[in-house]
Image (cartoon, rainbow, N blue to C red):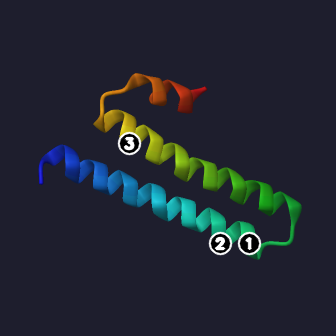
């Protein structure tokens, strides 16, 4: 496994953990503010994965899309 693949695996693992924490919080909370915040955490996990893939494949379009 190359260095770039190891970094991609680490970033995808972090993105998956953040995404799962957001989903668990989204499903377990009753307060509207907590639900909205957990939804944002879920989106952050998705954006971490998108930026990891765009960095790995050297595609700037996905990276710019996540910033916007």
How far across and down, in percent of the image, does residue 6 sit? 21, 53
Q: Which residue is mark 2?
A: 24
Question: Residue at the bottom extreme?
Answer: 28
Q: Is residue 28 above or below residue 62?
A: below
Mark identifier at residue 39: none
The quarter holding residue 57 reads top left
Cα gap from disc 1 to disc 3, whole angstroms:
26 Å
Residue visible at 46% across and 55% down? 15
Residue visible at 37% across and 41% down? 53
Q: Quadrant of the C terminus?
A: top right
Q: Secondary structure at mark 2?
A: helix
In the image, taking residue 38 as reference, residue 18 lies left or right, namely left
Mark 2: give few (<14), some (14-19) or many (20+) Cα within 10 Å. Answer: few
Q: Which residue is mark 3?
A: 52
Q: Secondary structure at mark 3?
A: helix
The quarter holding residue 27 reads bottom right
How far across and down, in percent of the image, does residue 34 sit? 79, 62
Residue visible at 46% across and 29% down? 63
Q: Secondary structure at mark 1?
A: helix
Q: Which residue is mark 1?
A: 27
Q: Is residue 57 above or below residue 46?
A: above
Is disc 1 in contact with disc 2, using a CB cutoff of under 8 Å? yes
Front residue (pair 49, 31): 49
How far across and down, in percent of the image, does residue 48 sit? 47, 46
How far across and down, in percent of the image, does residue 55 sit? 33, 34
Q: Earlier in the sequence, mark 3 or mark 2?
A: 2
In the image, taking residue 31 as reference, residue 27 lies left or right, namely left
Cα gap from disc 1 to disc 2, whole angstroms:
5 Å
Q: Is residue 41 above or below residue 60?
A: below
Question: Residue at the left extreme?
Answer: 1
Numbered disc total: 3
């Amino acid at each position: 496994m190359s260095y770039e693949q190891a970094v991609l695996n680490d970033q995808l693992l972090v993105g998956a953990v953040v995404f799962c924490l957001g989903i668990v919080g989204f499903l377990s909370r009753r307060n509207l503010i907590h639900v909205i915040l957990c939804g944002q955490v879920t989106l952050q996990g998705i954006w971490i994965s998108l930026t990891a893939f765009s960095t790995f494949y050297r595609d700037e379009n996905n990276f710019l899309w996540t910033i916007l």
